[in-house]
Each structure stands twice: as structure tokens, then as C-alpha cells.
Image (tube, helix red, strand yellow):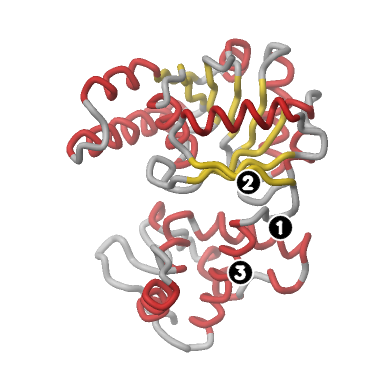
């Protein structure tokens, strides 16, 4: 029985997971060593509630209860010791995830399940950082978490049937549709999305069209809800680059990152979170490739 969930990491994904978990009826604690980041997460989650209320997406009673379900903490060991499920949502870097899993393994109770929110990384490898591979799985949430309907659930080599069933039930209680798949680099969605987004950068690099024209062609011609540049600005160019580097290493040449994408990241153009990515969010004007 899952009652208490610890969400490790208070960034965009962590706060979104915490929100849907609380709305789903779970007692959720967001944990981050950075107190300022925790405060920012609380403000952002409050903003999601307010927008949901104004648009009739959630009732006042449900919002009030969900807010009561949420807490914020900087002590990971304390959160791990009380949780039935821990969902790690830190950056896609092995050394950071390793540190988290070693800590939660030391403090979590025997029955606790471990999940990693990852779009490309191996749940089998991540499970090796702790000592309960049968209770470890990947939950790939999509940004923005409170709007996107899917959770991709990925079994590692030793993930048990019980764990897969429990995590699917948790995701569904959070209001999500699910697919349960076996591990392979990039899973289903990230492999396709990375290819489309990377090809769009090659097109931009070649001068085939402006970002706006390429986005419009993909949205209207292929019926995508967002263009590849709109999407990469939302998820972060640095996150996309990290994913492509991983897929390039694991799956070969077709995932080699476009040089222009690498240039943008080096320039600090990381997307909405930095104010500039492919587009400029400081004055809403489109950035022109130079």
C-alpha cells in the first residue's frame, strides 16, 4: 500500500510530480538540499493550483485537500525513512542519481519502492546504485506534468511484476495513462522526440527555414501539438543535449547532436528557464540564427 511519496528534486519535473501525486490523494514530500529551490517549487505549485481553480480544472475542496497533502523538506534521509515510494527527479547525470540512490537505500524501509524519473537512462544501471533492483523502476513523466497524460513505465532487468503493477496503479491514481515497457536506451518516446528535435536543428543550421516556419510545418503538417523548437525550449536545450549524447553513445551515429544545438547550450541559451533558447522569452521576439 502506497500512502507516502517522497519526490527528490524540486525542479520543473519534481514539482509537477509532487502536484499530481498530491491531487491523486498521496501524502507527498518534496525534498531538495536547496532551500531557495524548495521555496520556488512551493510558489510554482501554488500557481498551478490557482490556474487550475480559475479554469475549473480542480474544485476548491480538492485543491485544499491536495495542498494539505504537500510538504517540503531539505533532509533526504528523513524523507526516505518515512516513504513508501521515492521518486527521484534530479538532473540526468549518473553521478547525481547515484548519490541519491545510495542515500535512500541507506535510510528507506524494506518495503519502500524506488522510481527514477528519466527520459533515457537505464533503470537497470540506476538500480545498481542501491540494493533492491526488484523494487526499482523508471517512471518517465512528461513536461508539463500536470497537463501531459502519459507516464512511460520502464522495467529494469530485475524489476518484479509486483513493482510494475504497484507503480502503474500509482501513476493511474495520479490521473495518468500508462504504458509499461522493457528497458532499451531512449525507451519509446525519447528516441522519436530526440530524432525529430535534432533533425530540426540540422534544418535550422542548414538555413532551410526559420524556427517559426519549421515549427509551423511540423505542427500543421504532422499534427504535433508543439513544434520541435517550442518543445526543446520548454524541456531545456541542455536536457535535450544530454539525452542526445547518451543516445549517441548507446545507439550510434543517427543520434549525434547537431553542432548548432551544442552552440546554443554553450552560449547559455537553454530555453524558457534561462529566458532565451531558440526563441527569446525576454521580449517574445524570435532569435535569429547567427
Label 3 neighbour load within 10 Å: few <14, some 14-19, many 20+: some
The first of marks 2 and 3 along the sequence is 2
Q: Secondary structure at mark 1?
A: helix
Q: Residue at x 47, y 28 (%)?
A: 173
Q: CA distance from mark 3 to mark 1?
A: 13 Å
Coordinates of residue 43 in the picture (x, y in percent): 31, 32
Q: Secondary structure at mark 2?
A: loop
In the picture of the structure, the residue carrying the numbered disc 2 is 92
Circle number at residue 195: 3
Q: Residue at x 39, y 40 (%)?
A: 146
The first of marks 1 and 2 along the sequence is 2
1 and 2 marks in contact (CB < 8 Å): yes
Circle number at residue 246: 1
From the viewer's perspective, is the residue at label 3 or at label 1 nearer? Answer: 3
Coordinates of residue 179 in the picture (x, y in percent): 60, 45
Up the image or down, 261 lies above or below 275; here it is below
Up the image or down, 231 lies above or below 160; here it is below
Amino acid at each position: 500500500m502506497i500512502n507516502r511519496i517522497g519526490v527528490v528534486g524540486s525542479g520543473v519535473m519534481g514539482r509537477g510530480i509532487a502536484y499530481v501525486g498530491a491531487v491523486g490523494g498521496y501524502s507527498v514530500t518534496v525534498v531538495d538540499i536547496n532551500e531557495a529551490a524548495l521555496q520556488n517549487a512551493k510558489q510554482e505549485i501554488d500557481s498551478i493550483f490557482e490556474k487550475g481553480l480559475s479554469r475549473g480544472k480542480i474544485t476548491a475542496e480538492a485543491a485544499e485537500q491536495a495542498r494539505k497533502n504537500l510538504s517540503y523538506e531539505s533532509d533526504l534521509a528523513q524523507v526516505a525513512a518515512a516513504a513508501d515510494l521515492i521518486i527521484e527527479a534530479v538532473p540526468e547525470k549518473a553521478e547525481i542519481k547515484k548519490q541519491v540512490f545510495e542515500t535512500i537505500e541507506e535510510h528507506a524501509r524494506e518495503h519502500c519502492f524506488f522510481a527514477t524519473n528519466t527520459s533515457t537512462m537505464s533503470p537497470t544501471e540506476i538500480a545498481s546504485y542501491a540494493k533492491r533492483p526488484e523494487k526499482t523502476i523508471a517512471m518517465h513523466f512528461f513536461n508539463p506534468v500536470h497537463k501531459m497524460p502519459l507516464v512511460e513505465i520502464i522495467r529494469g532487468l530485475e524489476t518484479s511484476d509486483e513493482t510494475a503493477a504497484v507503480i502503474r496503479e500509482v501513476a493511474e491514481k495520479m490521473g495518468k495513462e500508462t504504458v509499461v515497457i522493457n528497458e532499451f536506451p531512449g525507451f519509446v518516446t525519447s528516441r522519436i522526440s530526440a530524432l525529430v528535435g535534432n533533425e530540426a536543428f540540422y534544418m535550422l543550421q542548414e538555413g532551410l527555414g526559420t524556427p517559426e516556419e519549421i515549427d509551423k510545418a511540423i505542427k500543421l503538417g504532422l499534427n504535433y501539438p508543439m513544434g520541435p523548437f517550442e518543445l526543446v525550449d520548454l524541456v531545456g536545450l541542455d536536457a535535450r543535449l544530454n539525452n542526445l549524447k547518451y543516445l549517441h553513445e548507446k545507439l550510434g551515429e543517427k543520434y549525434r547532436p547537431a553542432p548548432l544545438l551544442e552552440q546554443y547550450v554553450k552560449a547559455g541559451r537553454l530555453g524558457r528557464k534561462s529566458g532565451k533558447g531558440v526563441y527569446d522569452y525576454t521580449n517574445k521576439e524570435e532569435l535569429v540564427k547567427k
